[in-house]
Image (cartoon, rainbow, N blue to C red):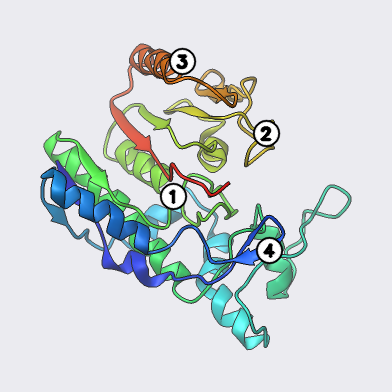
Amino acid sequence: MLTFYSEGSRLRQARTELHDGALVTPFECPERLDLVLKHLCHSGLGDIRAPAAYGLAPVLAVHDQEYVTFLANCWKEWQAAGHEGEAIPNIWPARTMRGDRIPQSVSGQLGYYALAAETSISEGTFEAAMASKDVALGAVEHTLQTGEPSFGLCRPPGHHAAFDQFGGYCFFNNAAIAAQRALDAGKRRVAILDVDFHHGNGTQQIFYKRDDVLFISLHGDPEVTFPYYLGYADESGEGKGEGFNINYPLPPGTSVNTWMATLEQALAQMKAAECECLIVSLARISHRV
């Protein structure tokens, strides 16, 4: 199986993350790439290839233009404003505030476009996100052209990135970008199977009203884990998308047997929906607790 990987993924080297009330070194770091690459080489899975550069058009197929512009300019504007640390949001358009205005201040924009406070924007973040989506696109293009499976080693990850929000280390939604590319190439319906521990809230939001993408997520119960406000079993899609969003929130202590049985059910639902392409979203499987 061919693996796609980009050295550009290392350009994001954030120093700051808010965790349990303390500023810590981010858990999501370039060294994680080395761990995966090491095991890929030892496993003999197949060749590792750099992707082509696909530009912004595939990003704008699933993300808001103003949001993308914000990500491209944030670090430069943050520095120009005289801030010393990395760009971390500290205020949001919460329930008692207006959510229909985007402030001119970069600090206000951070809150508007962020879904959580743990993820900082640092030098190289936008460039790494661009490299990561190129990896996803390289992998899906290879599969579309050859019919063979492929693996995209995407970093930063993507499944928390919504139409116009970042968070959970995610800036561009790589799985959504790849799914849209498969649809544009002629696939009638694509399945995204998300087996990360956390719910893929961004992927759900992007496709929630659509029936050309079946989104199924197996994840820790949002009653007790991030992202808390999305990922419940009663979220089944809206309008044309009704029935094409399936969540399996699993409680703490779920056994391997239960998880595997749930996976089998998800696979049966993908088959019943007659999906023509499968994208497995595995953003990250470990988290410091």
Return the residue nearer the eye: 52 or 254.
254
Which x, y percent locates residue 270? Answer: 37, 18
Q: Secondary structure at mark 1?
A: loop
Asked whether the beta carbons under mark 3 and mark 2 sit within 8 Å of each other, the answer is no
- Tell me which numbered mark, 1 or 4, is placed earlier along the sequence: 4
Q: Which picture quadrant has residue 70?
A: bottom right
Residue drawn at point x = 15 percent, y = 52 percent: 41
Estimate the spatial distance between the alpha carbons at disc 3 and disc 2, rounded to whole Å.
19 Å
**Three-letter code, disc 1:** Ala
Residue ranking furthest to the right: 96
**Three-letter code, disc 2:** Val
In the figure, is residue 99 to the left or right of 163? right
Q: Quadrant of the N terminus?
A: top left
Q: Which residue is mark 2?
A: 224
Q: Secondary structure at mark 2?
A: loop
The circle drawn on residue 22 is 4
Which x, y percent locates residue 3? Answer: 19, 49
Residue drawn at point x = 70 percent, y = 59 percent: 112
Q: Which residue is mark 3?
A: 258
The circle drawn on residue 78 is none
The circle drawn on residue 61 is 1
- Tell me which numbered mark, 1 or 3, is placed earlier along the sequence: 1
